[in-house]
Amino acid sequence: MKKSCLVALLLLLNSSCAYLHSTQIGEINSAAVKNGRKFELLISETGFNLEEAGAIARYATRGTQAANNFKFIQNTLALFQMGPKTGNPVFNEAYADVLVDMIKEKCPSGNMSGLMSVRESSKYPVVSGEIVKITGYCIEG
């Protein structure tokens, strides 16, 4: 019995999916694409799904007082987690705020074209990777 539960848990933990939540692209100047320097920025944060974690913990401890304790902990922590509605709540809500500074660092001239932003997540049981990717072309000078 324990071996089959362990195998099921390992299969569950090795499965994942990727979700595209949004993408935006700005005006594209063909001269910037041809003569500019392409840059790419990637930033991510870990998300956490309390409902999945609680369900796994309750299943592992079913029939014991610990199962009730996990439900109480899950409900209490849910009160403090906020985050994007398209993915799991993240630990640091402002993780993408540094992107403006990163873009300025990659293109100090501020003259850029073809900015594209992609927001996606990689979902695993209980945790997820919330990802923001920015690409663009910087025109020097």
Image (spheres, helix red, strand yellow):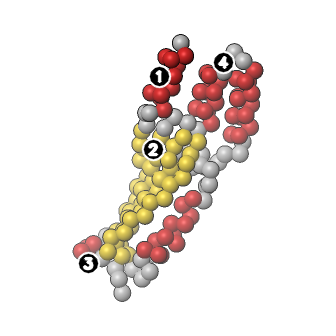
Q: Nearer the viewer, mark 1 or mark 3?
A: 1
- Packing grade of label 1 (10 A; few <14, some 14-19, many >=20) is few
Secondary structure type for disc 3: helix
Determine which residue is flagged by label 1: 7
**What amino acid is at disc 4?**
Arg
- Mark 4 or 2 closer to N-term? 4
Nearer the camera: disc 4 or disc 1: 1
Q: Secondary structure at mark 2?
A: strand
Badge 4: residue crowd in 10 Å (few <14, some 14–19, many ≥20) = few
Label 3, on which residue?
A: 35
Q: Residues within 10 Å of mark 3 (few under 14, many from 20)?
A: few
Determine the CA span between mark 4 and mark 2: 29 Å
Verify CB contact (< 8 Å) between mark 3 and mark 2. Answer: no
Where is residue 44? Give x, y as percent. 50, 55
Residue drawn 54% across the image and 60% down it = 96
Distance in Å between CA atoms under marks 3 and 4: 63 Å
Whichever of callouts 3 and 4 sits on the residue coming sooner in the sequence is 3
Residue contact at pointers 2 and 1, CB within 8 angstroms: no
Q: Amino acid at mark 2?
A: Ser
The picture places residue 124, in percent across and down from the top left corner, at 48, 38
Residue carrying label 2: 122
Q: Which amino acid type corresponds to the residue marked 3 in the rendered image?
A: Asn
Q: How far is mark 4 from mark 1, CA to CA?
A: 18 Å
Q: Nearer the viewer, residue 26 or 46?
A: 46
Q: Which residue is mark 4?
A: 62
Q: Earlier in the sequence, mark 2 or mark 1?
A: 1
